[in-house]
Image (cartoon, helix red, strand yellow):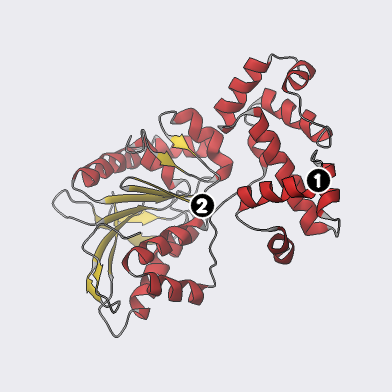
Amino acid sequence: MVIRTNGRIDNDGIILAIVRIDVLTLDGAFDLGLGAVLDTLAIANELAAPGPAPFDVRTIGMRRTVRTQQGFRFSTQPVSPRSRCDVVVVPALGCKTPETLEAALARRDVREATAWLRLRARQGARITAACTGTFVLAASALLDGHRATTTWWLAPTFRARFPAVELDESHMLVESGAIVTAGAALAHLDLALWLVRGVSPSLADVVSRYLLVEARPTQALYAIPDHLSHSDELVARFEQWVRRRLAHPFDAQASARAIGTSTRTLARRIRRTLGKTPVGYVQELRVAHALHRLRTSDASLDEIAAEVGYRDGLTLRVLLRRKTGRGVRELRRRA
């Protein structure tokens, strides 16, 4: 995967041209995410020596001075329609709840930023965002019709606000056309390493070793399924009913009757809130329970499979591999 920019390498891995990156820094920026992007790219530049630095990074903003979520002030270069870049990075805003995020998106500087992002896209820049920065990108309408990911616990809010975006919050990184989105918090690292890898895979490998970062293709290992269900009272009741009966075969009609609704309404509400079918969400709950048992017990895979409604461990093994990208032994070892 090569960044379609000025960044080029020859057959010996020598940098031939630099990649110009604008990091859009808004008031209330998430310090950890912003720092992860800037530090990773700075380390890449240092480790590329004795050759030229591959990245020309600017922190730009809608104001000359911004204050991060933690209250740190620093100067940014003002945006300019005349300047050009190859890549734009939109780090997260320090918002943890739908209410604070909605308030941030209504701010004047954020609205101005979405217009600037559309301009940059028309000029041919590759647009990227991580965590709640994906909300800013989606507000520009550049994500309409594209696949994307975001911070997993705000996925229901994202779906409700941006129905034209095909959201898959299970992924850590999603590339769709000229747009790249990353998941929650430390996915800023994954995005920054993706940028480095687009110029030099070998340099990205060295940087990841310096940072002690391993490949994390999915957020499924970290998401809390019942947290997501609380965005809708009916879906929350369904989640509670399923958890009490994880060891039993799933019956959509029985579950709908038990919580006082129809199968069609239940399916519609789960799709609207979680982007999944009822069966898909039941699988998420079973995987979450199985992961917990793998990490906290010595129970056999067959025993755990019986606890979550499967006849044998083979079915559960395949499901865990598909959902997490890891085998059972690796999941136990990581625990």
Considering only vertical position in the picture, is 244 above or below 211? above
Q: Do we see residue 184 in this rendering?
A: yes
Considering only vertical position in the picture, is 53 above or below 34? below
Residue 328, image quadrant: bottom right
In the rendered image, the quadrant that contains the C terminus is bottom right
Amino acid carrying mark 1 in the image: Asp
How far apart are labels 1 and 2 at the CA level?
30 Å
Residue ID at (23%, 54%): 78
**Does dot 2 land on a helix, a strand or a loop?**
loop
Choose between 128 and 327: the one closer to the eye.
327
Q: Do we see residue 226 in this rendering?
A: no
Residue ID at (42%, 68%): 40
First of labels 1, 2 by sequence position = 2
In the image, 268: left or right of 24?
right
In the image, 116: left or right of 283?
left
Give the number of marks. 2
Provide the residue designation for mark 2: 172
* Residue 135 drawn at (x, y percent): 43, 40
Q: For the residue carrying disc 1, how many other residues have a C-alpha within 10 Å: few (<14), some (14-19), or many (20+)?
A: some
Extreme bottom residue here? 50
Considering only vertical position in the picture, is 90 above or below 37? above
In the rendered image, the quadrant that contains the N terminus is bottom left
Residue ID at (58%, 32%): 274
Amino acid carrying mark 2 in the image: Met
**Does dot 1 land on a helix, a strand or a loop?**
loop
Considering only vertical position in the picture, is 206 above or below 91? below
* Residue 122 drawn at (x, y percent): 20, 43
In the image, 308: left or right of 21?
right
Label 1 or label 2, whichever lies nearer to me, is 1
* Residue 26 drawn at (x, y percent): 37, 50
Provide the residue designation for mark 1: 312
